[in-house]
Image (cartoon, rainbow, N blue to C red):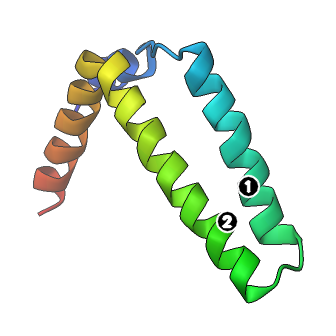
Amino acid sequence: MNEEDLKNLKDLRFTFTKEMQEMIDKLLSMRYILDNEKLSNRKKAKLEKEFSKLLLEFKKELHYNNPVQIKIIHNYLQNKKEIQK
C-alpha cells in the first residue's frame, strides 16, 4: 500500500441511514450500561445478548448500504495481511 492507496481509503464515504444512526445510539447506550452500571448476572446476560443481536443487525445494514466501501476495506486489510507475512 502506498500513500495514494491510504488517501483513497481515508476518502471513503459511508451511507448511514436514520435506522443505522438509531442503532448506533442504542449500541453506545447499551455498551455504556454494560461497562459502568452494576447489573445482576441475569440482566447483564440479557443486555449482552440484545447488544450482540443489535450489533449483528447493524453490521448487516452497513454491508447492505455500503457494499463497495466494505469491499475496498476488505481488500485493504487482506493486502496488509499478505504484506506482513
Instruction: Identify the image quadrant of the N terminus.
Output: top left
- Residue 40 position within the rendered picture, expressed as x and y whole percent measured from the top left: 81, 85
Nearest-to-viewer mark from 2 and 1 = 2
The structure residue drawn at horizontal position 41% and vertical position 39%, both measured from the top left corner, is: 59
The answer to whether 66 is drawn above or below residue 2 in the figure is above
Occupied quadrant, residue 13: top left
> CB of mark 2 within 8 Å of CB of mark 1?
yes
Q: Nearer the viewer, residue 43 or 24?
A: 43
- Give the mark, 2 or 1, whose residue is nearer the N terminus: 1
Indicate left or right for 14 with 36 as reference. left
The structure residue drawn at horizontal position 70% and vertical position 83%, both measured from the top left corner, is: 42
- Residue 23 position within the rendered picture, expressed as x and y whole percent measured from the top left: 62, 34
Indicate left or right for 85 with 36 as reference. left
- Residue 54 position within the rendered picture, expressed as x and y whole percent measured from the top left: 53, 47
The answer to whether 40 is drawn above or below residue 34 in the figure is below
How many marks the image carries: the answer is 2
Name the amino acid type tagged 2.
Leu
- Residue 10 position within the rendered picture, expressed as x and y whole percent measured from the top left: 44, 21
Residue 30 circle label: 1
The answer to whether 72 is drawn above or below residue 81 in the figure is above
**Helix, strand or loop for disc 1:** helix
Residue highlighted by disc 2: 47
Crowd rating for badge 1 (residues with CA inside 10 Å; few <14, some 14–19, many 20+): some
Crowd rating for badge 2 (residues with CA inside 10 Å; few <14, some 14–19, many 20+): some
Residue 68 circle label: none
Instruction: Identify the image quadrant of the C terminus.
Output: bottom left
The structure residue drawn at horizontal position 56% and vertical position 25%, both measured from the top left corner, is: 20
The answer to whether 18 is drawn above or below residue 43 in the figure is above
**Helix, strand or loop for disc 2:** helix
As drawn, which residue projects farthest toward the bottom?
Answer: 41
Name the amino acid type tagged 1.
Met
